[in-house]
Image (spheres, rainbow, N blue to C red):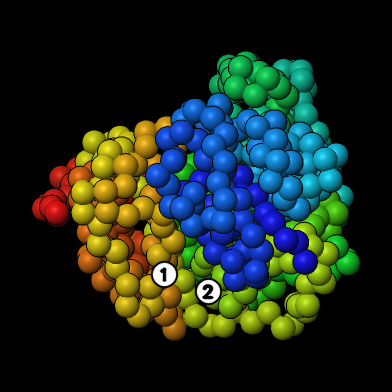
């Protein structure tokens, strides 16, 4: 078994990976930026190495510094977590050539699925449903217009190097298309250094439903059911749940089979996620694949009883999956995750870094909290504003909502603003309660909700 793993990340996911390693008897090496010296992941890892200044570009994104730390400490593997270098094919390739296991798929798979037009063509060849659109990329406006006309407006123009909502433009007619096509290409070139785009029919008010897959190095691939991630604000997920309140057992089986086919098509290894859009009629379409562990993985862990981070490590070590599709029981339980962020929902979600002067975490039945923060912790301004994930679970969705409501109410965080009032307001909203959310849900919710309802009424003090 692997003896020592470097965790190339920070915050709650670094903590989550260290926990899995410790349970498996694997030594851990944390890396940290100067801003994270007091961070919990440095304290609880067996060892920790500073890799540079606060800015991510100078530390957590510096492949050479992380590889130097890995060589110095003689680790067997690197776990990249999510964000930062987790979907960087060049980094995975460097790990491969240094003979350090990258805990994830091969660099070739990351590269293939990171190009969103190539990902689309890859899964299409395996008969996974994709959204009607261009074959490959479109470089010429005239050709684009022809494609748009043949699939019918509205259409969406997407950057091949985009993903996660970056680099997309919608066109509702021919005139708009000519304008947006140029804009999309220029923006993509500026943002990603790659101006290539492709075209799809624009699906209005879809649900975002993603399937977790696990693939070992012996040809076995299974899916672990879905997560419904329709509650998003500006392409940032806010609440995720499993199972989706929208899927029937029949649709779940069909989408699960498609997810496994998509993973097969790209020779996938390790944990991955297939993202689908699902329209009102229940038609589903592949949009992209995430080749990493995701923030929202805990809801799948809860409804399947499978520890995904341990599975990632065991798969990387070469162990057979030891799971058959028919053994994977979606237990009938329900899990909901709320992302807790240091931001002020009453001031347009402005980041709210600073010192936490009081911290009282919720607990009790039906609650899991994955967080790296503590009383007197300084939330740094340099990184993502997420300070934890509050996960509730119960025998059904209603019970999971009862636990979540109660836990949000008793979660006390003083000194900084958080999005807890926003989460409470969504949990109280009939549209959410009835499971009627689409990717436009948050926007609509905010249009009909006065800002003062999203402000903390009392601020807890130490
Ligand atoms: C779409 C779409 C509608 N039609 N593609 C946004 C993120 C990226 N993963 C793909 N995205 C979308 N692609 C077609 N053809 C709508 C979105 C979209 C969206 C998707 C998932 C979750 C939230 C979203 C919010 C706005 C738009």
Percent position of residue 189, x then y: 66, 18
> What residue did someone put label 1 on?
368
Question: Tag count in the figure?
Answer: 2
Do tag 2 and tag 1 residues touch (Cβ < 8 Å)?
Answer: yes
Foreground disc of the pair 2, 1: 1
Q: Which mark is residue 302?
A: 2
Q: Which quarter of the rendered picture does the C terminus lie within? A: bottom left
Q: Is residue 148 above or below residue 10?
A: above
Residue 272 found in image quarter: bottom right
Kindly identify the residue that appears in the image at 65 percent across and 24 percent down. 192
Could you tell whether 367 is left or right of 48 in the image?
left
Q: Quadrant of the N terminus?
A: bottom right
Quadrant in which residue 339 is drawn: bottom left
Who's the residue at 78% across and 29% down the image?
Answer: 137
Label 2 beta carbon within 8 A of ligand 1: no
* Left or right for 344, reference 93: left
**CA distance separating discs 2 and 1:** 10 Å
Whether residue 324 appears in this view of the structure is: yes
């Amino acid at each position: 078994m692997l003896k020592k793993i470097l965790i190339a990340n920070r915050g709650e996911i670094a903590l989550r990976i260290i926990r899995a390693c410790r349970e498996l008897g694997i030594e851990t090496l944390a890396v940290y930026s100067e801003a994270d010296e007091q961070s919990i992941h440095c304290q609880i890892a067996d060892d920790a190495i500073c890799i540079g200044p606060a800015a991510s570009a100078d530390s957590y994104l510096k492949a050479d510094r992380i590889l130097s730390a890995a060589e110095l400490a003689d680790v067997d593997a690197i776990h990249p977590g999510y964000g930062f270098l987790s979907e960087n094919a060049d980094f995975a390739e460097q790990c491969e050539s240094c003979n350090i296991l990258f805990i994830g798929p091969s660099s070739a798979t990351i590269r293939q699925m990171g190009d969103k037009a190539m990902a689309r063509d890859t899964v299409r060849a395996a008969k996974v449903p994709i959204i009607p659109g261009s074959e490959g990329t479109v470089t010429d406006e005239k050709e684009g217009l022809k494609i748009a006309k043949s699939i019918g407006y509205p259409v969406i123009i997407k950057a091949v190097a985009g993903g996660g909502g970056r680099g997309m433009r919608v066109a509702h007619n021919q005139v708009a298309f000519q304008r947006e096509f140029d804009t999309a290409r220029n923006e993509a070139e500026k943002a990603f250094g790659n101006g290539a785009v492709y075209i799809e029919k624009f699906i209005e008010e879809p649900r975002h439903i993603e399937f977790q897959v696990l693939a070992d190095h012996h040809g076995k691939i299974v899916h672990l059911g879905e997560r419904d991630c329709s509650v998003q604000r500006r392409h940032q997920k806010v609440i995720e749940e499993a199972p989706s309140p929208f899927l029937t057992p029949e649709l779940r089986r069909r989408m699960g089979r498609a997810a496994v086919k998509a993973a097969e098509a790209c020779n996938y290894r390790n944990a991955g996620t297939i993202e689908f859009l699902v329209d009102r009629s229940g038609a589903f379409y592949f949009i992209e694949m995430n080749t990493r562990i995701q923030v929202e993985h805990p809801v799948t862990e809860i409804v399947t009883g499978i520890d995904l981070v341990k599975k990632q490590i065991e798969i990387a070590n070469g162990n057979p999956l030891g799971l058959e599709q028919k053994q994977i029981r979606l237990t009938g339980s329900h899990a909901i995750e709320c992302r807790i962020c240091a931001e002020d929902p009453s001031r347009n979600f402005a980041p709210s870094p600073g010192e936490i002067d009081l911290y009282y975490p919720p607990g009790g039945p039906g609650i899991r909290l994955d967080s790296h923060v503590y009383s007197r912790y300084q939330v740094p301004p340099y990184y993502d504003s997420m300070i934890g994930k509050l996960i509730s679970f119960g025998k059904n969705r209603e019970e999971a909502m009862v636990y979540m409501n109660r836990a949000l109410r008793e979660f006390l965080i003083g000194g900084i603003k958080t999005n807890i009032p926003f989460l409470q307001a969504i949990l109280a909203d009939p549209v959410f309660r009835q499971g009627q959310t689409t990717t436009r849900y948050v926007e609509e919710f905010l249009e009909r909700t006065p800002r003062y309802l999203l402000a903390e009424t009392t601020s807890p003090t130490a």
